[in-house]
């Protein structure tokens, strides 16, 4: 063992010897290789141009497709929900709405019923509406269709202050309200949705011709239809009444 007197000279001697440098060139090489890989990946991946996506146009198309099938804007669904429904078949969309309104012991339909009971604009139809809801839940949905048609006709006519006119053009009233909505996109599209639905519901259909494939106000209220209506048809009218009443609140 070295004595204390030998330690100091030995330490000085070791410090005086140049240390071997650590070879870190592999780090630089690895960094350069990863940078080249990153550039190659970036070049091979096509990044979508989101600026070209028009979400309003997509929502608008969804609303109008559903309205053409008899489903106006449903207040508990998001625009995305309706856009996805528009991609389904008409039969699948009908099944969705029947399930939505009837499952859990008519929970969603009962929300609509409570909402209607609070609306001043529906006060004069309160008793008739109550019977419509009760009948539907009992499975007697056919009787609700002519009743709901008359209520919708009165509510839409009120929106145009046209109850005193001899012949009220309901689709025109809806279209005019859509134009008046200006920059309010959702409100405008809800009125457009109603216009498309009412246009289809009230379309000319001479009694001597083949029965219309879609519910027709004239055939129904003039007793010319054979009443092969479905649950979905009744729910279309409950849904349309909710849409227009929400616009008028």
Image (cartoon, helix red, strand yellow):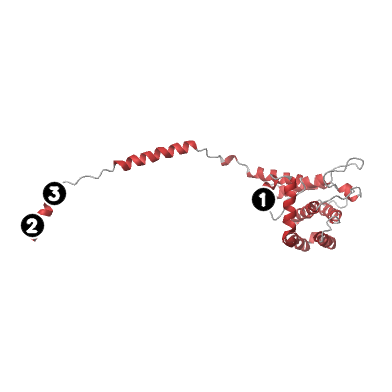
Q: Secondary structure at mark 1?
A: helix
Residue at numbered disc 1: 81
Disc 3 secondary structure class: helix
Q: Position of residue 173 (x, y in %)?
A: 80, 47
Pointer 3 residue: 16
CA distance separating discs 3 and 1: 78 Å
> Which residue corresponds to mark 2?
6
Q: Residue furthest front?
A: 1
Q: Quarter-wise, where is residue 27 in the image?
A: top left
Q: Is residue 207 left or right of residue 121?
A: right
The total of numbered circles placed on residues is 3
Which circle's residue, 3 or 2, is located before the other in the chain? 2
Residue placed most toward the observer, 87 or 243: 87
92 vs 74, nearest the viewer: 92
| Earlier residue among tags 3 and 1 | 3
Residue 118, located in which quarter of the rendered image?
Answer: bottom right
42 left or right, relative to 218 = left
Q: Earlier in the sequence, mark 1 or mark 2?
A: 2
Q: Do labels 3 and 2 touch, CB within 8 Å?
A: no
Whole-angstrom CA distance, mark 1 to mark 2, is 87 Å
**Image height of 106 relative to 194, above or below:** below
Q: Is residue 188 found left or right of 130 in the rendered image? A: left
Q: What label does residue 25 carry, if any? A: none
């Amino acid at each position: 063992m070295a004595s204390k007197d030998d330690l100091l000279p030995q330490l000085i001697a070791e410090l005086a010897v140049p240390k071997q440098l650590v070879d870190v060139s592999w780090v630089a090489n690895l960094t350069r290789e990863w940078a080249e890989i990153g550039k190659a990946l970036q070049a091979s991946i096509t990044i979508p141009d989101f600026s070209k996506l028009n979400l309003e146009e997509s929502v608008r198309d969804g609303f109008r497709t559903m309205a053409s099938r008899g489903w106006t804007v449903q207040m508990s669904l998001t625009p995305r929900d309706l856009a996805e429904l528009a991609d389904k078949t008409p039969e699948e969309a009908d099944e969705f709405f029947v399930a939505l309104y009837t499952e859990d012991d008519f929970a969603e339909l009962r929300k609509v019923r409570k909402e209607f009971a609070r609306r001043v604009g529906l006060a004069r139809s309160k008793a008739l509406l109550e019977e419509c809801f009760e009948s539907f839940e009992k499975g007697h949905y056919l009787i609700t269709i002519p009743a709901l048609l008359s209520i919708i006709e009165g509510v839409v006519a009120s929106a145009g202050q046209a109850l005193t006119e001899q012949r009220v053009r309901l689709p025109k009233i809806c279209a005019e309200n859509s134009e008046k909505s200006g920059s309010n996109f959702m409100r405008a599209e809800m009125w457009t949705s109603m216009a498309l639905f009412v246009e289809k519901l009230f379309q000319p259909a001479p009694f001597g011709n083949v029965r219309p494939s879609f519910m027709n106000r004239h055939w129904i209220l003039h007793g010319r239809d054979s009443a092969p209506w479905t649950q979905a048809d009744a729910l279309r009218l409950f849904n349309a009444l909710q849409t227009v009443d929400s616009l008028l609140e």
